[in-house]
């Protein structure tokens, strides 16, 4: 690892770390400084967020204009973690975590030299400092970067022996061994022990299932990365069917799950902030498929499915979306006048949708009978509820007129702007009006021919 230490860390568009294969987030703290006096070229890392993963310590600056936006200290370079000092001065000072690293740097006759230095993590914000140190030690000793291909298997079994032995409430012949109050208490105790044993076995099965689910997500991510790399390395002589099948496989693998979902346990007080950034990264693929806008309900289902067992509540999702106004992400939460909330890309424009709606409502059939939300949904490729919101938006801009009947809402092209206010018999634009006249005359002729034949 020759070169600058610590190396820079790659971030997503929402300033979340790009995780390595098999890497999982474990703890997040805010207002953290990283100091090192032994390395002259060590960057100025003040007031940032530190994310502890199974592979690295990732520090991200709170300021987007900082020259040192994000750096990462690989746990593989850590050679020793010092115990925290216990003194009166340490009680009133900010908690500090000191550890020693070994790395290679440029210099010397051979080009690179091996060096060691002590790095100090100063935690100035609020957070569970002891839990962070404990997880730091645990991840460093686990050495997940060496054993990422090994499957995690659950161990241990429920303790205790059967309660129906010679010391139980019943004898081997099935008769009551104890009677009275003592017998009732003993029976209740055995019922509680059996229930506790069943719960332990159930939770062991659940933990095993969760560990297997994480393994499957990690495997799916590796397969997706291999598909992407193989697609980029191959020549352009690939037919459309192969490209479509590879894209379909990538989408399926992407929907399997998120390798390291943000949880309250790992993020603590930064839970909603980090959840908001992770959600902003996640919605980019669904938004591209939906044309730049997708309903909040659909995202809730897709995001929870991707998180697996780490489900979030609707309130958590809404709070995470609301924080997008305060952070620089390429997506936003939009609320229509009717109260329907959607997620849309900041580059999304209503002009294109309105143009497609105008093309739809100016067709001869639409000029006669109008269009419904279902008609617009089929044309735009979105849900009817969102199509209705687009039609209402077009109505508010003066493009459409609404007709409400027992059959529901139907929308027509608005011809009133084409009428000259000074001369009601003069139409300023003959294109749409003339098409409407032809459609109306054709409808009347068809109606008369039907009555004549009858």
Image (cartoon, helix red, strand yellow):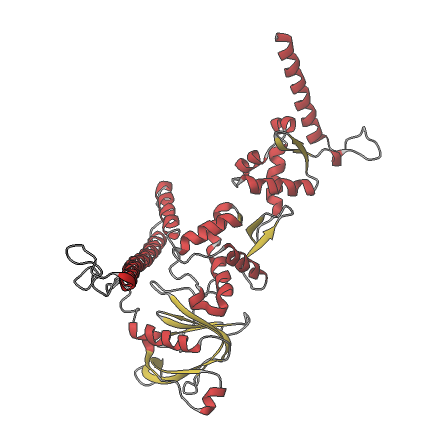
* Picture coordinates of residue 60, whole percent (x, y): 48, 71
Closer to the camera in the image, 436 or 123: 123
The residue lying at 23 percent from left, 65 percent from top is 160
Q: Quadrant of the C terminus?
A: top right
- Say which of 262 and 311 sits in front: 311
Write down the quadrant of residue 428 in the picture: top right
What residue is rendered at 33% in x and 51% in y? 234
Write the residue at 53% across / 60% down. Answer: 320
Residue at the extreme left of the image, as rendered: 173
Taking 117 as reference, is 393 above or below it? above
Q: Position of residue 349 (x, y in %)?
A: 60, 49
Q: 373 left or right of 30?
A: right
> In the picture shown, does residue 100 fall above or below 256?
below
Q: Residue furthest right?
A: 422
Instruction: Identify the residue at the far bottom of this view.
Output: 88
Q: How many marks?
A: 0
State which quadrant residue 228 falls in. Answer: bottom left
Residue farthest along the top direction in this orientation: 453
Residue 393: image location, x then y, percent: 65, 43
One can see residue 193 in this view: no
Q: Is residue 142 left or right of residue 342?
A: left
Asked whether residue 253 appears in the rendered view, the answer is yes
Towards the viewer: 339 or 33:
339
Q: Quadrant of the N terminus?
A: bottom left
Residue 332 image point, x, y percent: 57, 56
Q: Is residue 275 left or right of residue 232?
A: right
């Amino acid at each position: 690892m020759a070169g600058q230490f610590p190396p820079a860390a790659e971030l997503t568009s929402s300033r979340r770390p790009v995780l390595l294969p098999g890497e999982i987030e474990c703890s997040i703290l805010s207002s953290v400084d990283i100091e090192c006096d032994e390395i002259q070229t060590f960057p100025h890392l003040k007031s940032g967020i530190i994310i502890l993963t199974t592979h690295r310590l990732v520090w991200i600056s709170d300021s987007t204009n900082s020259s040192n936006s994000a750096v990462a200290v690989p746990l593989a370079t850590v050679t020793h973690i010092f115990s925290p000092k216990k003194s009166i001065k340490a009680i009133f000072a900010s908690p500090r975590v000191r550890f020693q690293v070994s790395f290679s740097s440029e210099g010397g006759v051979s080009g690179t030299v091996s060096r060691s230095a002590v790095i100090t993590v100063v935690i100035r914000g609020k957070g569970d400092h002891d839990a962070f140190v404990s997880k730091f030690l645990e991840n460093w000793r686990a050495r997940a970067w060496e054993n990422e291909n090994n499957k995690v298997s659950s161990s241990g079994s429920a303790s205790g022996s059967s309660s129906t032995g010679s010391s139980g409430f019943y004898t081997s012949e099935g008769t009551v061994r104890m009677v009275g109050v003592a017998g009732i208490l003993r029976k209740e105790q055995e019922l509680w022990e059996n229930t506790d044993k069943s719960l332990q076995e159930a939770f062991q099965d659940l933990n095993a299932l969760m560990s297997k689910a994480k393994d499957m997500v990690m495997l799916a991510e590796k397969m997706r990365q291999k598909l992407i790399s193989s697609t980029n390395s191959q020549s352009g002589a690939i037919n459309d069917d192969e490209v479509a099948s590879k894209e379909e496989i990538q989408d399926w693998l992407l929907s399997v799950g998120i390798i390291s979902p943000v949880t309250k346990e790992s993020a603590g007080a930064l839970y909603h902030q980090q959840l908001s950034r992770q959600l902003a990264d996640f919605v980019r693929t669904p938004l591209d498929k939906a044309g730049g806008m997708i309903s909040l309900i659909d995202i809730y289902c897709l995001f929870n499915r991707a998180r697996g067992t780490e489900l979030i509540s609707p309130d958590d999702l809404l709070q995470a979306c609301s924080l997008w106004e305060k952070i620089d992400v390429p997506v936003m939460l939009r609320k229509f006048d009717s109260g329907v909330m959607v997620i849309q890309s900041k580059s999304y424009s209503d002009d294109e949708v309105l143009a497609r709606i105008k093309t739809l409502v100016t067709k001869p059939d639409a000029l006669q009978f109008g269009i419904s939300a279902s008609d617009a949904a089929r044309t735009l490729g979105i849900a009817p509820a969102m199509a209705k919101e687009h039609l209402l938006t077009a109505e508010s801009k003066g493009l459409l007129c609404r007709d409400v009947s027992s059959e529901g809402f139907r929308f027509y092209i608005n011809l009133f702007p084409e009428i000259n206010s000074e001369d009601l018999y003069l139409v300023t634009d003959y294109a749409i009006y003339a098409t409407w006249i032809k459609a109306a005359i054709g409808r009347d002729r068809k109606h008369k021919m039907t009555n004549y034949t009858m």
